[in-house]
């Protein structure tokens, strides 16, 4: 094996241990495109040297920057559309009927740049507008990501015109955002106030998060090995109240765990109900 390939294998092992992400053996280009600038800034010439530096200085901040660069994904507003429609038309009415006096809680896991939790908050506002007085106890959204820089951006709720053009209708832009200068917008305070952002690595414990009625864990499980994926889904089940719902990404399926989840066909889309 060449030294370059050996370096890449070392890096793949590091990333899987750090955050569970399983890089394909053909992802050298992705790694170099995401890390080139960072390695240049730190005077690091090879991936092997990078891994060595992170191991010798685990608290130096470099490790965090590398994980950050490798886990940052572009995302969309109201991605795939149907989960947000299913939430408004089916899941919320059912849960409100079951728990009329309780505040409902939603977890948006691996929330990336914040579009998912804010889309959820807008969906809840749209539900309230057409179902006046039904959400008496309100809804809390807890959004987590392992990237500290991402969470800082999420909390600000500010987005540029490139981000705003991905999946956001003109009507929602005008209703839920304030202009913040040339080519920038900010999520309005009532939409922001429903969302609490917290740092969390999906490989770590979820105990501090509490219990949820709904979990959105979309378009992240594809990066994990089958074993890690099963572990995450088992531990997500432990955070869900009986009868609570799990939303996965459009290309993700829950194979196994029939004792924990029941598949629910929504046409379009599939969601999973906790047993």
Image (tube, rainbow, N blue to C red):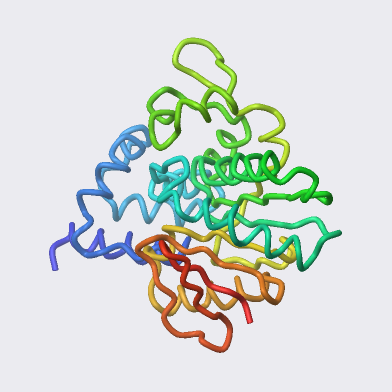
Percent of width and height locating residue 30: 25, 49
**Relative horizontal placement of residue 2, taking residue 76 as reference (left or right):** left
Q: How many marks?
A: 0
Percent of width and height locating residue 85: 52, 52
Give the quarter of the image for residue 240: bottom right
- The outermost residue toward the right is 101
Give the quarter of the image for residue 166: top left
In the image, 111 versus 69, the foreground residue is 111
**Relative horizontal placement of residue 228, taking residue 179 as reference (left or right):** left
Name the residue located 45 percent from the left edge and 33 percent from the top edge.
168
Against 10, residue 187 (above or below) is above
Percent of width and height locating residue 16: 41, 65
In the image, 57 versus 106, the foreground residue is 106
**Relative horizontal placement of residue 146, taking residue 226 as reference (left or right):** right
- The outermost residue toward the top is 182
Percent of width and height locating residue 233: 53, 74
**Relative horizontal placement of residue 161, taking residue 1 as reference (left or right):** right
- The outermost residue toward the left is 2
Image quadrant occupied by the C terminus: bottom right
Name the residue located 43 percent from the left edge and 79 percent from the top edge.
227
Against 203, residue 274 (above or below) is below
Against 3, residue 228 (above or below) is below
In the image, 147 versus 218, the foreground residue is 218
Name the residue located 41 percent from the left edge and 80 percent from the top edge.
255
Image quadrant occupied by the N terminus: bottom left
């Amino acid at each position: 094996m060449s030294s370059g390939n050996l370096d890449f294998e070392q890096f793949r092992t590091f990333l899987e241990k750090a955050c569970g992400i399983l890089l394909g053996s053909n992802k050298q280009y992705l790694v170099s495109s995401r890390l080139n600038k960072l390695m240049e800034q730190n005077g690091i010439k090879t991936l092997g040297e990078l891994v060595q530096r992170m191991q010798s200085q685990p608290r130096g901040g470099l490790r965090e920057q590398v994980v950050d660069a490798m886990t940052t994904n572009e995302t969309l507003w109201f991605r795939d559309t149907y989960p947000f429609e299913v939430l408004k038309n089916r899941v919320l009415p059912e849960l409100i009927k079951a728990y009329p006096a309780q505040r409902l809680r939603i977890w948006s896991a691996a929330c990336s740049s914040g579009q998912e939790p804010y889309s959820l908050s807008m969906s809840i506002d749209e539900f309230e507008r057409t179902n006046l007085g039904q959400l008496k106890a309100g809804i809390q959204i807890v959004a987590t990501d392992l990237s500290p820089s991402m969470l800082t951006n999420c909390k600000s709720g500010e987005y540029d015109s490139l981000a705003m053009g991905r999946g956001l209708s003109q009507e929602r832009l005008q209703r839920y955002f304030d202009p913040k200068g040339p080519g920038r917008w900010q999520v309005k305070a009532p939409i922001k106030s429903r969302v609490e952002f917290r740092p969390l690595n999906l490989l770590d414990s979820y105990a501090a998060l509490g219990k949820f009625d709904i979990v959105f864990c979309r378009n992240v499980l594809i990066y994990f090995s089958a074993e890690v994926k099963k572990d995450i889904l088992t531990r997500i089940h432990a955070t869900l109240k009986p009868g609570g719902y799990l939303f996965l990404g459009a290309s993700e399926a829950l194979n196994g765990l029939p004792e924990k989840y029941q598949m629910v066909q929504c046409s379009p889309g599939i969601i999973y109900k906790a047993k």
